[in-house]
Amino acid sequence: MEAQNGGGTPVILNVYDLTPINNYLYWFGLGVFHSGIEVHGLEYGFGAHDLPVSGVFEVEPKSCPGYVYRRSIWMGTTAMSRAEFRSFVQTLAGEYSGNTYHLISKNCNHFTDDVCKNITKKSAPGWVNRLARVGSFFNRLLPKSVQVSTVSHGATYPAFSDDDMDSISSSIIGDSDVDELDQHLLPAAVVDLHTIDVSPKLSKDLP
């Protein structure tokens, strides 16, 4: 896909339906969505598992297994090379371990919004994660005993190398989906996000 309104590599937000009821809720600005961020021909997302390692994964664009692709949204462009962007995502992955996934406060849409803010200085459209924000309000009103919580942090796990990442990915989307599509988790890396200079572009819908 070529960049719009100037040079740079496109930054695309791909949005997926998690449930058929979205066909009705979508027109009211609501829905239950998964999102991934597409840059340099790969799509990056965030999913849950029980281990204290990266929950960030990469897939072919618009093909995240387990979800139904709905639409793409142009978020702008980035001057980062493929290697620079991958290093950026690996660094961000250090803040998105699989066992920190939270349906309300730290889900896949929070991850893609974080990427967009960092490299385009624009937030993802509000409707993509609106139910989580609504849920956060109501969750605070509930007794603590029934509030939605993160995955348990109490267990102790052995150290994992990068070679273990592919096997862990099956706990996010299931073995059959892993076989169907080459998807794997990205190990975390250390890069100073604030040293990356990007030019923000206005976001707009793709046809």
Image (cartoon, rainbow, N blue to C red):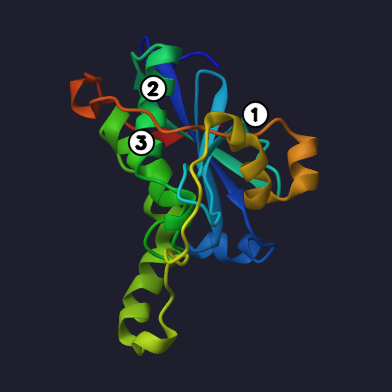
Identity of the residue drawn at 36% across and 34% down:
203
Read off the residue under disc 3: 92
CB under 8 Å between callouts 3 and 1? Answer: no
Q: Residues within 10 Å of mark 2 (few under 14, many from 20)?
A: many
Inter-mark Cα distance, 3 to 1: 20 Å
Read off the residue under disc 2: 87
Mark 2: amino acid = Ser
Inter-mark Cα distance, 2 to 3: 9 Å
Mark 3: amino acid = Leu
Secondary element under disc 2, as helix, strand or loop, is helix
Identity of the residue drawn at 57% across and 66% down:
25
Q: Residues within 10 Å of mark 3 (few under 14, many from 20)?
A: many
Q: Decide: is 86 above or below 81.
A: below
Indicate which disc, 1 or 2, sits on the residue closer to the N terminus.
1
Pinpoint residue 15: horizontal percent, then vertical percent: 55, 45
So how many labels did they put on this image? 3
Q: Decide: is 143 above or below 39.
A: below
Identity of the residue drawn at 35% across and 19% down:
78
Inter-mark Cα distance, 1 to 2: 18 Å
Mark 1: amino acid = Glu
Query: Foreground: 45 or 119?
Result: 45
Pinpoint residue 37: horizontal percent, then vertical percent: 48, 35
Examine the rendering and report whether any part of residue 168 can be seen. yes
Q: Decide: is 140 above or below 71.
A: below
Secondary element under disc 3, as helix, strand or loop, is helix
Indicate which disc, 2 or 3, sits on the residue closer to the N terminus.
2
Read off the residue under disc 1: 60
Pinpoint residue 207: horizontal percent, then vertical percent: 56, 32
Pinpoint residue 76: horizontal percent, then vertical percent: 37, 26
